Amino acid sequence: MTFLTHTFAQPRSPARVVVLGGSGFIAGAIRRRLEADGIPVLSLGRPEFDLFAADAAERLAAALRADDVLVFASAKAPCKDLAMLRENLVMGEAVCTALQKRPVAHLVYLSSDAVYKDSAQPLTEASCAEPGALHGVMHLAREVALRQVHTGPLALLRPTLVYGYEDPHNGYGPNRFRRLAGAGKEIVLFGEGEERRDHVDVEDVAELARLIIVHRSAGIANAVSGEVVSFRELAEHAAAAFEPRVAIKGSPRSGPMPHDGYRPFDNSAVLAAFPGLPLQVLA
């Protein structure tokens, strides 16, 4: 299972899309993009619908229909320890059990680029899935489990670092830099901000998900911009958007740079599957 294949050469709106975790940052963007296209969406999320609840599988099976597209985008993330890994696998088990009881027409799983082993060469959908952290282990385990129970078209959407205005987190990167600059506060970098990573706009991830859904695509899709930029460049971009321009300064690192400071991707497979798809590293 590697690159995307399309069931429908021309886009077709599904009867309904069920989004698990529809109130989340990326899932919410997908839900809004589908609704803007006039596609019926059923959003299931906490606290009303908790995949960790004892009756989650039964409730989900009862909510699903045979002609549904199911977008599984619910997770306790980032997965940092064994307790969180167990919780996420229990949630995944509930979805798998529900799918065995009530199969759907198309399944889209929101995974992560964390499933890939680090490489100095640009990563692709065919790259080795050998995660080096529990977050990637969690997503890879869920991917394998879903493959075992779902016999229809299955798309694995693996985004890299995602940014956007609605992000509720304040993690290091574009979202925090933009908020600091907008508040007139200086931006403090880890080291000199020299590590280079790929970032992608959440709206571009949502558009990729929409295209996968309307084409009933199956396979793996990396949601990446195909560009690597340094965190200092990202900070400079954020600072330039506001007046007065805030200061940017470095700071001592407390540990090694993640991924040895470099994690490139090649997005040519996704662009071949969907020509003209916008994928931005800076917006």
Image (tube, rainbow, N blue to C red):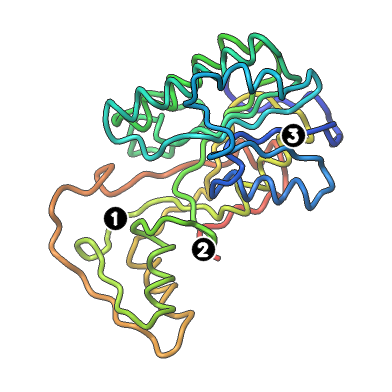
The residue closer to the viewer here, 74 or 164, is 74
Q: Is residue 270 left or right of residue 242?
A: right
On the image, numbered disc 3 is attached to which residue? 17
Measured Cα–Cα span from mark 1 to mark 2:
16 Å
On the image, numbered disc 2 is attached to which residue? 282
- Say which label, 3 or 1, has the lower sequence index: 3
Give the image location of residue 2, x and y in percent.
Answer: 57, 22
- Say which label, 1 or 2, has the lower sequence index: 1
The residue closer to the viewer here, 165 or 24, is 24
Q: Secondary structure at mark 1?
A: loop
Residue type beneath disc 2 = Leu
Give the image location of residue 96, x and y in percent.
Answer: 56, 15
On the image, numbered disc 1 is attached to which residue? 195
Do the residues bearing badges 3 and 1 touch, measured as CB atoms within 8 Å? no
Image height check: is 28 above or below 170? above
Residue type beneath disc 3 = Val
Image height check: is 257 above or below 16? below
Image height check: is 104 above or below 15? above
